[in-house]
Amino acid sequence: MSSAAGGGPASSTPAAPRGQRPRRGDVVELRIEGVAHGGAAVGRLERYVVFVDGAFPGELVRAEILRSKRDYANARAVEILAPSPDRVPQRCDHGGHPCPGSPWQELRYERQLELKEGLVDDALRRIGRLDGFDLEPILPAVEPWRYRNKMEYSFGTADDGSLALGFHRRGRWDVVDGVHDCWLASERSNAARNLVRDWCAQRGLDALDRRTREGFLRNLIVREGRRTGELQVRLVTADGEFEHEDFCRTVLAYDPGAGVLWTRTDRLAETTQGGETEVLAGAAVLHEELCDLRLRISPDAFFQTNTETAEALYGLARDYARLTGSERVYDLYCGLGTLSLVLALRAGEVWGLDVVREAIADAIENARACEIENVHFFAGDVRDALRPLAERAPRPDVAVVDPPRAGLSQKVVRRLLETNPGRIVYVSCNPTTLAPNARQMVDAGYRLVKVRPVDMFPHTPHIESVALLEREGGAGG
């Protein structure tokens, strides 16, 4: 039995000569052994490693080589010769193409959790050369489907010339596949996207061409408060004008309380950040409730995209901090202050630091609205602002860090270690950067006590985790 997995028949493509490094365009037969960090499947031609998109552990596949290097190759599965018993049908419809936003949705959810837990363990032991820690069982997502509170879509042109609104095809920066029902988004969010697409198509608005840079429509961001019921629709375009009053009326007819925003930007990069944003209706901010706190979120502010599981993640970080009510806590990369406020309910005082000034403004307003007075927020780059913060608020008992995927630079780790916290709670969205950061802390006299993976992003290879490190000589975990 065989099944297709993207691409057409491979019979006309040359097979790789046995014993030689494959070339681009060759088709090879591989038994998939496991997954690599980032989610690609791993197969081998003797000792030569091939990273395969569209395959899962245990499968026998035919894969087309896309890129060949001295030590490894990248490939895509074109035929599944022997599927894994963990393979399940794809729910999202992308015109026969694999879903670009959730490439693991064809893998049984319980197996996804097993692989993610193994990737965290592998990163810490192999990359970080760490052992002696307790790897706690992965915390599953509260909701494995329709969990995202924010969706970012791209406009494009479909094969038939019609307007498409969806996601970039996997591996293609210049092709956008339209989507009708994304299973990561709520039905309400899907309906708002389809409404905007149809309105733009009826008005004859064209999508930005990623090659020529011509066209008007760039992106659409749909954000919703899962607990508050608020909805925000933000259209991102190139410079120019359109019938924004009619657009606004159309969105408000669907949801009278929606915030309707219009961002104009001439940036070359595919990004929804920056530009000039105008509020067409409603408010610029969205509100959400998390851990019994009501939070305001500015359009460009970072907020965890999985509200329900973020609540579990922050609860875990709070528990790892083991606060008794008297501790001074640093919360670095605090964003709009969500975790800072959660910690402040059990700490003596919390000092939050983030480089995004709009997020800090949200954090200050959130603390005021929640009537939490033992938290202080400052805007600044952690690399430069941590020493001045330590002069103002002497040594923290606990430091919490929640950096972006790139992790902490060695300089930031050194600055953090200078403050000499008794405990460090590291909230990580990338185990391959957590591992070397934890290694540097261990080399400086800390002990990695425990780590728990958290599945914030079901059906994707992304992994969140919380780690506890303690200064040697401190209390155990």
Image (cartoon, rainbow, N blue to C red):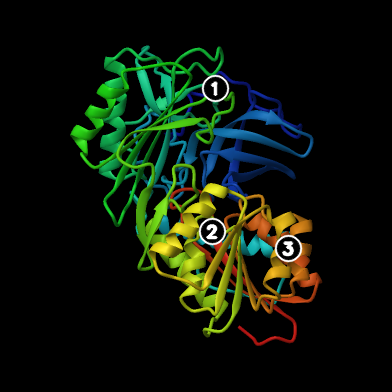
User: Circle 3 sits on which residue?
Assistant: 388
Mark closer to the observer (3, 2)? 3
Residue at 46% of width from left, 75% of height from top?
345
Q: Position of residue 102 (x, y in %)?
A: 45, 43
User: Circle 1 sits on which residue?
Assistant: 266
Residue at 51% of width from left, 25% of height from top?
265
Please tell me in which quadrant of the rendered image residue 279 appears.
top left
Residue 306 higher or lower than 94, as above or below: below
Which of 217/191 is in front? 217
Q: Estimate the spatial distance between the alpha carbons at disc 3 and disc 1, rounded to whole Å.
A: 37 Å
Residue 345 higher or lower than 205, as above or below: below
Q: Dot 3: within a 10 Å radius of its alpha carbon, few (fewer than 14), some, or many (20 or more) residues?
A: few
Helix, strand or loop under label 2: strand
Q: Position of residue 214 (x, y in %)?
A: 50, 12
Left or right position of 460 against 185: right
Which mark, residue 157?
none
Which of 234/441 is in front? 234
Mark closer to the observer (3, 1)? 3
Check disc 1 and give the amino acid type. Asp
| Residue 158 shows in the view | yes
Left or right position of 282 against 66: left
Residue 52 higher or lower than 435, as above or below: above
User: Circle 2 sits on which residue?
Assistant: 464
**Quarter that holds the C terminus:** bottom right
Which of 353/315 is in front? 353
